[in-house]
Amino acid sequence: MRQHTRTTHRLATLTTALLVGASGALALGVAPAQADEVAPLAATAPAASGVEGPAAPEVFDGGTAAGRAATPELTLERGAAAPQRAKHQWPVRLRTGPLRNRVGGTAPSAEPSRQLASAGVTQDRLTGQFGVELALRAAATEATNTRLRVGFGKVVTSNGQQVCQAQTGSTDVDRNTYGTTGAYNGASIAYRVDFPQVRRNVWNCGFVLLVSPDGATIYDGLVGTLRDIRQKPALGIFVKGRKVNNRSFTRVPVTIRNSKQTIATAPKVTISWRTRGAAVRGKRMVGTIKPGAAKKGAIYVRKTSRGPGKIWLTVKSKTYKRTVVLRIRNIR
């Protein structure tokens, strides 16, 4: 019986429940966590994977007009309550919204391709891009090509009304409403472009304008507030398989990594555990982990039963929590 117990000790190994490595039972890890799903406008939000979308429309001849029309007005809902700030909030990854308010003071054109049916915009602070999706009343032609102007701003009070006020560097160059790239699909236009300014600026409203070729007249425009989409950390736990026994504690290396596809730093990360058929020791405080960074450490494991065992490892940071299961099995 004693000999059988010694053999069991020698062949017990720690493996994980989530990923089987190609090199066998002693080289296993836990798959990294995926960043939160944060793309509310699938056609306009830049993909977290970095897959490129349709090429942006070409810049309108002459680029940005020298004389810009007045800041479009944005009237907010009356009686709208200001959002209550939570005790802890994760950082904003996206600012997005459909633009539902018609811009006032325009000079409407009778040409349907110079009229907006709908529009929406998205800022992505992680990728430094913005996306736009809009529909014209009719597809533009080469003869009716118009300046398409997309921009962002801050909601301010002016003459007793709340308006969207464009900021320095918050408006993209004018682009064509007519083209043959993948951005155009009949009367619909959808694209995203690099716009690094969205990484650092707090722009909470956006607008889309159709402007005359000479840049002097706004034919139509839509404007609206943008809502914040926040993102949590995405912590992956990587554990190297090790043989363990019930005579002493075995050091098991553990790496906790924050995904590159999140904008959130994980502060004051801790690790905890509960067990069945095993005993665990280790340091519980991990520290702060920035996006794309990792912390390395170890836990110490001792087997306490002859049969299989389990260890539930949990990492926490503020309101974020993730748990993975490690299995202790006997090798025959």
Image: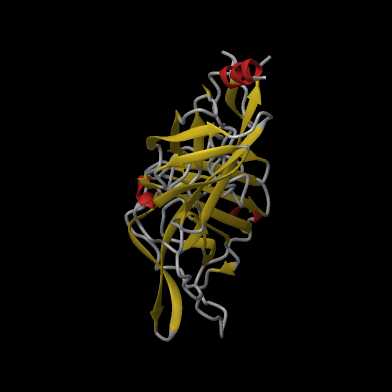
Q: In screen coordinates, is 258 left or right of 23? A: left
- Residue 251, percent from left and from top: 43, 29
The residue sitting at the front extreme is 1
Which residue is nearer to you in this view: 115 or 273? 273
Q: Can residue 52 be seen in this snapshot?
A: no
Residue at point 49%, 60% (across, down): 207
Residue at point 57%, 50% (across, down): 38
Report the quarter where the N terminus lies: top right
> From the viewer's perspective, is residue 25 above or below residue 325?
above
Which residue is nearer to you in this view: 71 or 81? 81
Q: In screen coordinates, is 141 left or right of 231? A: right
- Residue 111, percent from left and from top: 63, 56
Residue at point 50%, 36% (across, down): 237
Report the quarter where the C terminus lies: top right
- Residue 21, percent from left and from top: 58, 19
Q: Can residue 96 be seen in this snapshot?
A: yes
Q: In screen coordinates, is 268 left or right of 114? A: left
- Residue 7, percent from left and from top: 61, 16
Report how many numbered discs are placed on residues in the image: 0
